[in-house]
Amino acid sequence: MSKPLGVYVHWPYCARICPYCDFNVYKNRPADAGAWTTALTRDLERYAERTQDRKLTSLYFGGGTPSLAPLPVIESVIETCDRLWGFEPQAEITLEANPTDAEQSRFEGFAGAGINRLSLGVQSLRDEALKFLGRDHDAAAAKRAIAAAQDAFSRVTFDLIYARPGQTLDDWRIELAEALSFGASHLSLYQLTIEPGTAFGFAVEKGRWAPAEDDLCADMFDAAQEMTAAAGLHAYEISNHAAPGQESRHNLVYWTYGDYVGVGPGAHGRLSETGARIAIETPLAPRDYLAGAPHEETALEPREAEMERLSMGLRLHKGVSFAETDAFFAEAGAYEKLDRLIGDGLLHWDGQMLCASADGRRILNRVLYELFG
């Protein structure tokens, strides 16, 4: 049985670069729809030749802000994917969008093009927080966008960022309760992280403000698990909560270590070919990508691939399949690390599945560092 197959399309432009963002993004500019359609079609055709006789589980337009892309580009990609692969029944076609009024006006066009799931970058329902996060919408626009999205699309998800400076546990509970009241079938709840090289990274280095304390972050994480579960949105992944059957099919391709094609500037892909795991990265600069610059391909060593598989799978609540013969843990010393983490109550193994415990999920990055470091 072949792995599920998804396609990720990276649109690199944003109206504004958020201070916490470390993605491959650039200030928005007028886009030549024809040039982008040609470049994306070229790559999709190239990868279709390598993944013949397979249908797509998902197609995901991310970025950047893909809702800024010309509608003909979105339409062309969907039509090209259907022509080259075809879609599985109930395939998921997601577009990321921001809650600005200008983007809301395009929702019906996106739905008409074939988008069946919208992911809204709400980030907060508080005006002061949105200003701090560098967003170009306010709370009222966010609420209008959620309502408009739910009218236009059968599946809607939105993001929130918590553990912001000055935010208390009660603040978070009240904001999350308001978010849950909209009745979305999927929520992504992310702790604010400070990435090196970002505007927030420089601000923290200079002591302009400090991230939330670890204990408060843990309490906010626990509150999110409790409140989303009570609302019927189970935590199927560290940061993602969904009603039964509403999990992100595209992200599950990543977390279950399926195959995915990445097109657009700086997009990543993973393909399984002749027993090897192939890592692919496209050129970062839009100009180079449009010009057809070579993609970088690397055949991962078995140990690298196993580390990736376990790292991604441990993000899932159900964990990842694991046997004593798994390549990574055949190395001397690896079992001692695993035994220690199990003994500390951070991981659990039932002989078939390895998963993070509730305590382990709170500090999963540290657990992964200990396991693979």
Image (tube, rainbow, N blue to C red):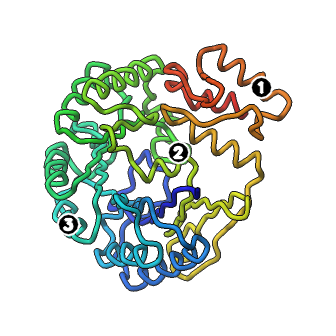
Pick the quarter of the image with the C terminus.
top right
Kindly identify which numbered label has been placed on residue 106. 3
Question: Which residue is denoted by mark 1 in the rendering?
Answer: 335
Q: Secondary structure at mark 3?
A: loop
* Image point (48%, 60%), residue name: 6
Mark 3 to mark 2 CA distance (whole Å): 31 Å
Q: Mark 1, residues whose alpha carbon is within 10 Å: few (<14), some, or many (≥20)?
A: some
Give, as a three-letter code, the residue at label 2.
Answer: Trp
Mark 2 to mark 1 CA distance (whole Å): 23 Å
Whichever of labels 1 and 3 marks the residue nearer the N terminus, that label is 3
In this orientation, which residue lies closer to the viewer: 12 or 27?
A: 12
Q: Mark 3, residues whose alpha carbon is within 10 Å: few (<14), some, or many (≥20)?
A: some
Whichever of labels 2 and 1 marks the residue nearer the N terminus, that label is 2
Q: Quadrant of residue 64?
A: bottom left
Residue sitting at the far front: 1
Q: Secondary structure at mark 2?
A: helix
In this orientation, which residue lies closer to the viewer: 144 or 150?
A: 150
Whichever of labels 3 and 2 marks the residue nearer the N terminus, that label is 3
Q: Secondary structure at mark 1?
A: helix
Name the front one of labels 3 and 2: 2
Give, as a three-letter code, the residue at label 1.
Answer: Tyr
* Image point (61%, 23%), residue name: 350
Give, as a three-letter code, the residue at label 3.
Answer: Arg
Question: Which residue is denoted by mark 2 in the rendering?
Answer: 255
Q: Mark 2, residues whose alpha carbon is within 10 Å: few (<14), some, or many (≥20)?
A: many
For residue 241, side relative to residue 299 (left or right):
left
Name the front one of labels 1 and 3: 1
For residue 290, side relative to residue 64 (left or right):
right
Q: Quadrant of residue 285?
A: bottom right
Measured from the top left, where is residue 225 in percent x and y?
Answer: 36, 25
